[in-house]
Amino acid sequence: MSRRSAEDLIRQGRVTIDGRVAVLGDRGDAESVVVAIDGVPIPTRAGLVYVLLNKPEGVISTASDPQGRQTVVDLVDAGTRLYPVGRLDAGSSGLLLMTNDGTLANLVTHPRYGVEKTYVALVRGVPGKEAIRALLAGVVLEDGTARAARARLVAGHKDRAQLELVMTEGRKREVRRMLEAVGYPVLALVRVAIGPVADPELAAGSWRRLTIKEVSALYAAAGATWEDAPAMMEGDK
């Protein structure tokens, strides 16, 4: 957000500091005050950056690759070192968060917080109700049972179909392995949403910074707020 935009919000009375309507020139300890826009708390600690990337197929979801392949870090120039939140395998595409906020990264990726990730899979064959029920009930994989929080057939024609799956875990190639286990190999896989964050207009290979509301919504999806999450994480250790 530019300084001019911030000043406009303050003039409009939309910014509060610790519940008090802010005025131009207000300052405070960024570690202790609670700043909100339209009642939504915003990150105030300096240096935290949040990016949404639409990862293309063939790009590796790591900070570096010993084989010299292109990584997601190569695609994002945000002025500071960022790390991918979770992963998408090289053959998959779609939305990937990148940040230097370790607390948010853990909240989004750890299964205990239940942040949903939504995928659209193109599969060989047309799954029936029994296959959908199996995905919801749980599919036994070599590393344990995996299940979709929600699953539905989007479209099917002849020998191909589109499925939407909502997952709360992020095990390696989990969606692909589940679908193959129920008899429907994946031909293409796209992640279209991470919790409440989606952007169908973001082109493959492009990225943008998250808005304040999106960052707050991601914390809320994990049952936390930006202010109390660090203390909560300390208690989990």
Image (tube, rainbow, N blue to C red):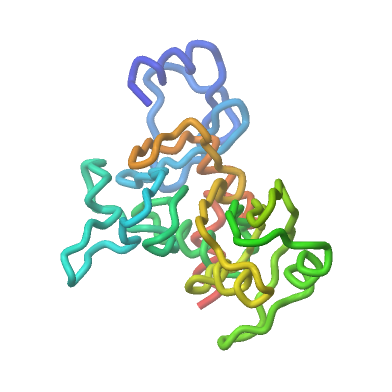
Left/right placement of residue 45 relative to residue 218 reads: left
Q: Residue furthest front?
A: 158
- Which residue is rendered at x = 55% and y = 63% of the image? 186
- Which residue is rendered at x = 43% and y = 51% of the image? 97
Residue 205 in the image: state x and y as whole percent: 33, 42
Left/right placement of residue 195 relative to residue 9 reads: right
Residue 227 in the image: state x and y as whole percent: 53, 50
Residue 112 in the image: state x and y as whole percent: 63, 70
Tell me which corner region of the image, top left, top right, bottom left or bottom right, holds residue 1.
top left
- Which residue is rendered at x = 76% and y = 68% of the image? 131
Instruction: Please state the total of marks drawn on the protein image.
Output: 0
Left/right placement of residue 176 relative to residue 6 reads: right
Of residues 5 and 34, the one nearer the viewer is 5
Of residues 231 and 101, the one nearer the viewer is 101
Relative to 121, residue 235 above or below: below
Tell me which corner region of the image, top left, top right, bottom left or bottom right, holds residue 47.
top left
Of residues 135 and 182, the one nearer the viewer is 182
Relative to 102, residue 196 above or below: above
Q: Residue furthest bottom?
A: 142
Left/right placement of residue 173 relative to residue 131 reads: left
Relative to 203, residue 120 above or below: below
Residue 20 in the image: state x and y as whole percent: 58, 27
Relative to 119, residue 234 above or below: below
